[in-house]
Amino acid sequence: MPMVPLEKLMQITQRFEFLEAQMAQGDAGADIATLAREYSELKPVVEQVVEYRQLLDDLEEAEAMLADPEMKELAEEELPTLRERLPVVEDALQLALLPKDAADARPAMIEIRPGTGGDEAALFAGDLLRMYQRYAENQGWKFEIISQNITELGGIKEVIAHVVGAGVFARLKYESGVHRVQRVPTTESGGRVHTSAATVAVLPEAEDVDITIDANDLRIDTMRASGAGGQHVNTTDSAVRILHIPTGIIVVSAEKSQHRNREIAMQVMKTRLFDIERQRVDDERSADRKSQVGSGDRSERIRTYNFPQGRVSDHRINLTLYKLDQVMQGDLDELIDALTADAQATLLAEMET
């Protein structure tokens, strides 16, 4: 594919140098946090630009040396290596220049709910929760369960977790969709393999500047919270239920503190409304969005976990790994790397047209 014009690369470098100067001056009139964010985003791009331009200079110099009898032999030795490096460096630069999802660096909310399959689906939802907990631990992220509803068998009726760390949404955003499991349930006496499912939604956390909620659009109720199986009844009205009237979205938080419940419920509400707005914008931007990896279509069956055969298959990229045990222990990097590479390839193809 054609490379970006050098003039455009020069503009990127100049912008980076301007940001660097602004931050060094500590200009009180500038939003340092905003400058720092743009600076950190541009830095890896500029590093690739510098390497690319240096390689072009080296190539030009080596080709000029061919006309010098004393330098010709050295130039003939260097040129094959330089020419071999060129497409590699060009590819790296193209990837660095791909449009970034502004939400990639954000924390995320993970919501997991059982689908078809009854008790077995709820148990599988619990397995997925532990898989993501272990992955977050491997990444050095903070993983906090902010709301969960557990079944009598220890499965999950619904869970919402908050994940904070470097590049959380960028790594987890392709997990949204229907996850299917094929295995013999612990409740099955006949040894038959059952198919069940659970739905995962990964949403970038909303910031206050992203979404404004009119207080008149909300109905906030407090209610009595109870523990599992009706035991440990909380006799205070601490649970909080928030209804967003225009969309019909309902969020409930039932921790011990009413103040904390209101805080949690409002953050989840903002994040869900922000996700709706992001999807609306994406739909306008791309008519064929649903055909792309990471489209966020929660009804799409994205992955199957087959326990009898020890394999996991991602249907979006036709990838099958025979390492189910490791995946369930949180070893997700191979899957996520492949999904990221596929999404990047799609973006590169769109840039060519």
Image (cartoon, rainbow, N blue to C red):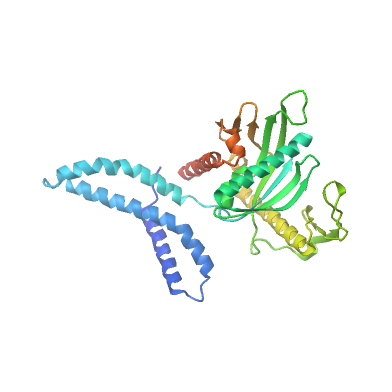
Is residue 20 found left or right of 297 in the rendered image? left
The residue lying furthest to the front in this view is 232
Q: Residue at x 43, y 54 (%)?
A: 45
Is residue 114 found left or right of 78 in the rendered image? right
The quarter of the displayed image where residue 118 is located: top right
The residue lying furthest to the bottom in this view is 28
Q: Residue 271: x percent and y percent?
A: 68, 56
The residue lying furthest to the left in this view is 69
Can the viewer see residue 315 in this picture?
no
Q: Is residue 344 shown above or below 220?
A: above
Q: Residue 276: x percent and y percent?
A: 68, 52
Q: Residue at x 81, y 41 (%)?
A: 152
Q: Residue at x 47, y 60 (%)?
A: 40
Q: Residue 265: x percent and y percent?
A: 75, 58
Q: Is residue 172 shown above or below 42?
A: above
Q: How many marks?
A: 0
Q: Nearer the viewer, residue 159 or 343?
A: 159
Which quadrant is home to the N terminus? top left
Q: Residue at x 70, y 55 (%)?
A: 273
Q: Residue 197: x percent and y percent?
A: 71, 35
Q: Nearer the viewer, residue 185 or 274?
A: 185
Can the viewer see residue 19 in this picture?
yes
Q: Nearer the viewer, residue 349 or 100?
A: 100
